Amino acid sequence: MTAGSKHQDVLDWTNACWDRLPAHPELRGRAGEMAAKLAGEVAGGKLPFLALPFLNALANDLAELERAYLPRFEHMLLLGIGGSALGARALQKAFAPGQDLPGHAGKSLWIMDNVDASTLEAHLSRLPAEKTLVYVVSKSGDTIETIGQYFLVKQWLKNALPGAWKDHLLLNTDEKKGYLRQEAAQFGIRTLPVPDNLGGRYSAISAVGLVPAAFLGMDWRALARGFKSVAAPLAEPGLDARKLAVHPSFEFAVWAKALMDAGYSELITFFYIPQWASFADWFTQLWAESLGKDGQGSQPIPAVGVTDQHSVNQMFLDGPRNKACLFVERAEGPAGLPFPADMPEIFDYLQGKRFGELLPAEALGTRMALCQSEVPLLALRLGADDAERAGKMMALLGAATLLTGWLMGINPVDQPAVELGKRLAKARLGASGLVEEKTALAAFTGQAGGGTRDERGL
Ligand code: PA5
């Protein structure tokens, strides 16, 4: 339980359907192997996302930024994509929802994680440069989507603020290599490091997510505290089979891999905390990019209650029986406004109730309906929806993803398959070299002849 809360944080395995997952005892038996692997990787500095060796230095940096730098700006324009953007967005939507509400007057965070030309122009024509901090996040420092935007935004800053543009840039990138690091060195731009071996999708609890959190005034210390409380035991010396076996991330990984082995090829993440909907997107990327390898994995499906009850839920309940569900809810939500006394008779059951009672009732209804449809379901029930719980959940899901990948026998921290599309796009844009890619492109687009095209009018 988290200090100051009256509800426990619970993983409810009641409907996990272990009886339909024959591989689970054998997978549980691998706790010793997994513990040894964890210990070895932690000792080799390969898992900073669990060991958090950078956290104290980062806390000092953040405190300094909060004191003397961030208060100068009203807008943060974050340039980043994938793991460099999704954690920040999840935190923003969960803990600084004001920007999506009428009458917003506080700070604003704008996350540019796409290359839509009109959206970039719209931002640059409306944002006041003198009140805007541009936060560029790229571990590699070379990602074309981010760097392409960076070139244009830097030019915009230079035009608007010829003497001060550098002061409006903060770069978060690899400590030694990559184009952004060169930029920082050449122009003396303020930077924060992405520690070695901290890959994008595992980096939300680092400067990647915590700088935007601090900018928006979130309780980033509680977030980090919650994260550490779940992650640190996995990085402690002396981790063994017995200790790992009782860590919830291992049980989750056993369940997830046993589900895959039993043919459950899709994993729904149903968030019944509406403001946490973007955590489902964060988890989707984490799970998909980490585990979709060697013909294995399970497709994550993000969903939010109650909205998606009127969208994809029919498919969840009565479509192919290949789905499992991680169901995230909180013990207690806001009470909401009372319903008025003068309601029509058919809505009598709402008399004397408050609006906040709809959500838990619908969550229960949907959870039970999923179970009755034989969807194996793990419920993560948080005592409250505060920053500390968000940190705990992020550590649980990050560690579970890693361990699931190891149980699958794949590398959960790389993403080799997505490289081809990136190389082809560069070839298409005329980058030097890439001869094979250019030849393959010409064949694919029919320019080299040979291929039979089949295009028809709409
Ligand atoms: O999770 C990942 O590793 C990726 O999604 C990266 O975050 C994404 O490709 C962006 O990479 P970078 O931070 O190097 O610009």
Image (cartoon, helix red, strand yellow):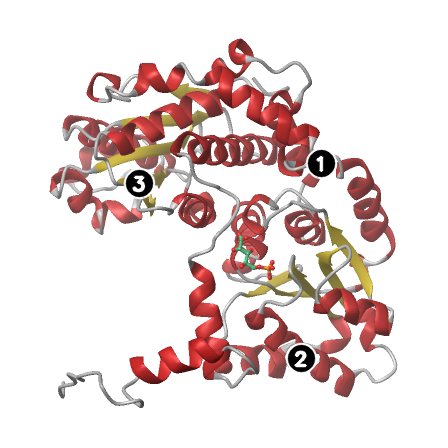
The reply to whether residue 225 is visible in this rendering is no
Which residue position holds label 1?
Answer: 221
Q: Position of residue 263 (x, y in %)?
A: 21, 35
Q: Earlier in the sequence, mark 2 or mark 3?
A: 2
Q: Quadrant of the N terminus?
A: top right
The disc placed on residue 433 is none
Neighbourhood count class around disc 1 (C-alpha, 10 Å): few under 14, some 14–19, many 20 upward: some
Q: Nearer the viewer, residue 410 or 352?
A: 410
Say what amino acid the circle numbered 3 marks: Ile
Left or right: residue 299 versus residue 83 is: left
The disc placed on residue 151 is 2
Q: How many numbered dots are placed on residues in this image?
A: 3
Q: Position of residue 11 (x, y in %)?
A: 41, 21
What residue is shown at x 60% (from left), y 36% (from top)?
A: 387
Q: Position of residue 92 (x, y in %)?
A: 57, 51
Q: Nearer the viewer, residue 438 or 212?
A: 438
The reply to whether residue 398 is visible in this rendering is yes
Between label 1 and label 3, give the one nearer the viewer. Answer: 3
Neighbourhood count class around disc 3 (C-alpha, 10 Å): few under 14, some 14–19, many 20 upward: many
